[in-house]
């Protein structure tokens, strides 16, 4: 057993071959994570001292980042005692994930390629989560895919998902062609660390593409319930799509909320914003020192936005994200690379 110490001074035990993320969770310490397959880089942390072993390829890191000591905690284990530089959510108590049966309450087409799924849980489930988190849905044939929860926790206990069709995708075929009210499924969750931190007095910015709007909607509902002293100075959603139909939903009512619809393949008559959400945000010359950014949707947008915003002056620790990377892929073949 190895001892891992974070630069915030927390320690946890980690066995050889055990992902650092799992070892931290087993000791009650929450480290940031999302995909758990080495793709999204949410669990990125830096080895300050000690040796670690890559259990699977770290697809979410560039060669320069690897050379600089960065690792992905979801696919790395300790090979000695280790000191880690990592965003440590030690004080945050997120509900523990559980596996539960659920039934489809309704299926509704929101756009040609987007459906709203409402799931209901057994009355005794007492399922709770933080707005922004996601669940894994386990289909009737065992197929398991991740989906963000699109509404804040509600007394009804109903869970809403916004699902975009992926051509030929196993779960897409189920949701769009075969899913019926009352179908029995299972879910595992809540998962991930994409949730609203302290936003008081800051300029709160949401960058999302496609169904990346789903967790943003849940966070907006939570935002609407904050006390005045907890509220951000401003709140803006930049929602990117290719064409107008990709903006399949109206934002919930939140005092002072501004929503900017952005199109990358806009027709000539489109009078709104064009291009990429992060470029539209930066073109407004924001005061990045006062901004906090929550980004969700395509991996390409999140990587581009994170790099550009930090290089333009967004302070460290002010970019939170959930990348909708392919969730069918298990970590690829084990590797033996160490650092
Ligand atoms: C944390 C997380 C949250 C997510 N939340 C949502 C959500 O709220 N709404 C939503 O619509 N989706 C979400 N996704 C994506 C979702 O989990 C599935 O990966 C996606 O819907 C495809 O599943 P499928 O079974 O239809 O396709 P699969 O059978 O998994 O894949 C079919 C083909 O498409 C490719 N593919 C699959 N997904 C992607 C992708 N994202 N980008 C590029 N190629 C891909 C596969 O490599 C494969 O070749 C989320 C993913 C993650 C990791
Ligand atoms: S790369 Fe580790 S959680 Fe996504």
Image (tube, rainbow, N blue to C red):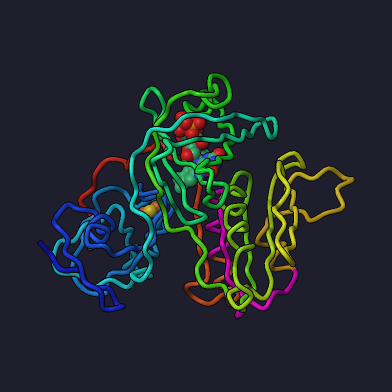
- Quadrant that contains the N terminus: bottom left
Residue in the image at 23% along x and 47% along y: 335
In this rendering, position of residue 147 left or right of residue 22: right
| Residue sticking out furthest to the left | 1
Residue in the image at 61% along x and 74% along y: 291
Where on the picture, by quarter, is residue 220?
Answer: bottom right
Which residue is nearer to you in this view: 163 or 209? 163
Which residue is nearer to you in this view: 331 or 163? 163
Which residue is nearer to you in this view: 237 or 254? 254
Q: Residue 322 location in percent, x, y? A: 49, 54
Q: Residue 299 location in percent, x, y? A: 52, 50
In this rendering, position of residue 241 left or right of residue 214: right
Residue in the image at 51% along x and 46% along y: 148
Task: Note whether residue 62 is visible.
Answer: no
Examine the rendered structure and indicate whether residue 57 appears above or below residue 43: above
The question of residue 270 being in magenta is answered with no
Task: Note whether residue 214 is visible.
Answer: yes
Magenta residues? 284-306
Q: Residue 65 location in percent, x, y? A: 39, 64
In this rendering, position of residue 329 left or right of residue 317: left
Examine the rendered structure and indicate whether residue 57 appears above or below residue 158: below
Where on the picture, by quarter, is residue 200?
Answer: bottom right
Q: How many marks?
A: 0
Q: Residue 246 location in percent, x, y? A: 70, 41
């Amino acid at each position: 057993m190895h001892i891992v110490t974070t630069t915030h001074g927390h320690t946890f035990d980690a066995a050889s071959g055990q992902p650092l993320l799992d070892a931290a969770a087993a000791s009650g310490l929450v480290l940031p994570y999302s995909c758990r397959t080495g793709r999204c880089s949410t669990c990125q942390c830096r080895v300050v001292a000690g040796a670690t072993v890559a259990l699977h390829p770290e697809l979410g890191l560039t060669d320069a980042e690897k050379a600089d000591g960065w690792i992905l905690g979801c696919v790395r284990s300790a090979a000695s005692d280790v000191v880690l530089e990592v965003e440590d959510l030690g004080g945050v108590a997120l509900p523990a994930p559980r596996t539960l049966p659920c039934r489809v309450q309704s299926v509704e087409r929101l756009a040609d390629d987007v459906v709203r799924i409402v799931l209901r849980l057994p009355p005794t489930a007492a399922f709770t989560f933080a707005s922004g988190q996601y669940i894994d849905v386990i289909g009737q044939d065992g197929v398991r895919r991740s989906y963000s929860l699109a509404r804040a926790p509600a007394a009804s206990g109903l869970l809403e998902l916004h699902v975009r069709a992926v051509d030929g995708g196993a779960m897409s075929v189920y949701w769009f062609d075969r899913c019926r009210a009352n179908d029995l499924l299972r879910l595992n969750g809540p998962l991930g660390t994409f949730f609203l931190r302290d936003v008081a007095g800051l300029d709160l910015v949401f960058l999302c593409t496609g169904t990346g709007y789903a967790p943003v909607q849940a966070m907006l509902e939570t935002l609407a319930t904050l006390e005045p002293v907890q509220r951000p100075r401003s709140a803006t959603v930049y929602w990117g799509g290719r064409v107008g139909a990709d903006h399949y939903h109206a934002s919930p009512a939140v005092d002072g909320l501004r929503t900017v619809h952005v199109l990358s393949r806009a027709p000539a008559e489109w009078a709104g914003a064009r291009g990429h959400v992060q470029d539209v945000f930066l073109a407004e010359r924001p005061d990045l020192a006062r901004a906090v950014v929550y980004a969700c949707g395509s991996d390409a947008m999140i990587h581009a936005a994170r790099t550009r915003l930090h290089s333009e002056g967004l302070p460290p620790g002010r970019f939170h994200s959930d990348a909708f990377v392919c969730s069918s892929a298990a970590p690829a073949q084990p590797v033996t690379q160490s650092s």
